Image (cartoon, helix red, strand yellow):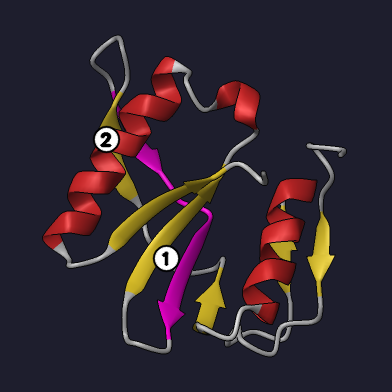
């Protein structure tokens, strides 16, 4: 799959927007999965969430997760889509730790999806 593929997704019946932009083929795949998942009430990529994290040189960074998802049972989750070859990188792990804490404080789940 072409990872760096960008585009617009128009089949958004569960997004509050009439289209969403994707930054990779994996993100587009996730949009299709979310649209067809009967347990998903609503999803969006343009959610306005920014999570602070610290890089390995102790600089504060800002991380915008891929998706905010609301389920029919009222659970909410942030889903980050990653190529499997990048999941174990230091930056991804640091972002993940910060995002997990951010979500926990808000009663949300954090999920890393690799497309497999």
Q: Say whether residue 68 is magenta.
A: yes
Please state the horizontal and vertical placement of residue 31, each as a whole percent of the image.
69, 67
Please state the horizontal and vertical placement of residue 87, each as a whole percent of the image.
51, 28
Q: Is residue 114 visible?
A: yes
Q: Is residue 17 left or right of residue 73?
A: right
Q: Is residue 24 visible?
A: no
Name the front one of labels 1 and 2. 2
Residue drawn at point x = 67 percent, y = 60 percent:
30
Please state the horizontal and vertical placement of residue 65, each as a whole percent of the image.
46, 51
Q: Which residue is mark 2?
A: 97
In the rendered image, the quadrant that contains the N terminus is: top right
Q: Nearer the viewer, residue 27 or 52?
A: 27
What is the magenta segment's predominant secondary structure? strand
Q: Nearer the viewer, residue 65 or 97?
A: 97
The boundaries of the magenta stretch are 60-71
The answer to whether marks 1 and 2 mark residues whose Cβ atoms lie closer than 8 Å is no
């Amino acid at each position: 799959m072409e990872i760096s593929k960008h585009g617009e997704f128009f089949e958004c019946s569960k997004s509050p927007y009439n289209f969403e932009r994707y930054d990779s083929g994996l993100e587009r795949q996730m949009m299709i999965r979310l649209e067809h998942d009967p347990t998903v009430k609503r999803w969006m990529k343009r959610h306005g969430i920014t999570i602070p994290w610290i890089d390995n040189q102790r600089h504060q960074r800002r991380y915008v997760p891929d998706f905010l998802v609301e389920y029919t049972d009222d659970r909410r989750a942030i889903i980050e889509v990653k190529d499997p070859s990048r999941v174990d990188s230091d930056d991804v792990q640091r972002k993940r730790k910060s995002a997990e804490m951010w979500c926990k404080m808000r009663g949300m789940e954090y999920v890393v999806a690799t497309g497999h």
